[in-house]
Image (cartoon, helix red, strand yellow):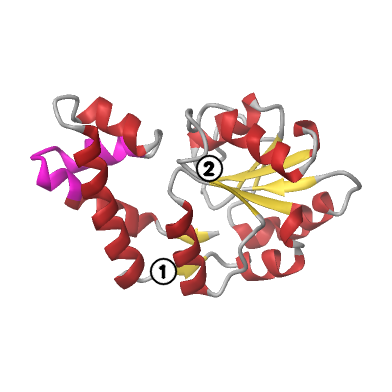
């Protein structure tokens, strides 16, 4: 819902610089795993607690000072969805999600599944399954909106319908593809309006 790609790239580049690591390789791994798993792969000789503390420092500073913008269509979509009808599934942490949403004026859902809520991150289905459980719906009645291969895989493994947005080409496995979030909004709202269904992102 929020365009934070450039922010995350800068944060990970700064973090990689502290440890003398290749920023591009670190970011490639970070896109697919939670931070703790990223540290284990790119800096196995470092104390993961220190790595996480350094990353938290950089990310918190970015939340305070970075420039953020909502994707086109996000305000329209979230303004039409009741807070209990959708969940946010993220590899980040809830306080940062709330900070970024506050910066963009987007509403926050009742259910947020963050990195601290699960032991396995995307592409594991666990985060999406937990979101469905907390929403009180069956996985097969959920719609996942994703733009990353690991998230798409997680949603598919959870047995959910997965639509890809904000990518020029469709991510492998998605049931439908939209080049922008705005293009997908009518379909998402129609799906979420079905009895017993919900949208998770």
Helix, strand or loop status at disc 1: loop
* Left or right of 2 on screen, residue 111: right
Quadrant of the rendered image containing residue 125: top right
- Disc 1 crowd rating (10 Å Cα; few below 14, some 14-19, many 20+) is some
Q: Residue at x 26, y 26 (%)?
A: 41
Helix, strand or loop status at disc 2: loop
In-front residue for pair 173/23: 23
Q: Which residue is mark 2?
A: 169
Q: Residue at x 45, y 65 (%)?
A: 100
**Which percent across, then down, holds residue 3?**
45, 61
* C-alpha span from label 2 to label 1: 24 Å
* Left or right of 186 on screen, residue 38: left
**Which percent across, then down, holds residue 62?**
30, 64
The answer, for residue 112, to whether it is visible in the render is yes
Quarter of the picture holding the N terminus: bottom right
Q: Residue furthest left?
A: 20
The answer, for residue 10, to whether it is visible in the render is no
**Which percent across, then down, holds residue 129?**
66, 32
**Which percent across, then down, holds residue 142?**
75, 40
Mark 2 or mark 1, which has the lower sequence index?
A: 1
Asked if residue 116 lies in the magenta stretch, the reply is: no
Above or below — where is 16 with respect to 70? above
Q: Which residue is mark 1?
A: 68
Above or below — where is 76 with respect to 30? below
Q: Which residues are magenta?
A: 15-30
């Amino acid at each position: 819902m929020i365009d934070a790609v450039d922010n995350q790239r800068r944060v990970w580049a700064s973090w990689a610089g502290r440890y003398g690591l290749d920023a591009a390789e670190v970011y490639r791994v970070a896109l697919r795993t939670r931070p703790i798993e990223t540290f284990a792969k790119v800096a196995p000789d470092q104390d993961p607690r220190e790595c996480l503390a350094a990353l938290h420092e950089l990310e918190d500073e970015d939340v305070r000072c970075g420039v953020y913008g909502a994707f086109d269509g996000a305000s329209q979509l979230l303004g039409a969805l009741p807070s209990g009808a959708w969940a946010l599934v993220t590899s980040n942490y809830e306080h940062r999600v709330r900070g970024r949403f506050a910066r963009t004026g987007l509403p926050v859902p009742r259910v947020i599944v963050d990195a601290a809520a699960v032991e396995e991150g995307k592409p594991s289905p666990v985060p999406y399954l937990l979101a469905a459980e907390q929403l009180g719906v069956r996985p097969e009645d959920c719609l996942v909106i994703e733009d990353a291969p690991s998230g798409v895989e997680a949603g598919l493994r959870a047995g959910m319908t997965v639509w890809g947005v904000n990518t020029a080409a469709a991510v492998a496995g998605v049931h439908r593809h939209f080049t922008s979030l705005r293009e997908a909004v009518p379909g998402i709202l129609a799906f979420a309006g079905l009895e017993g269904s919900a949208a998770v992102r």
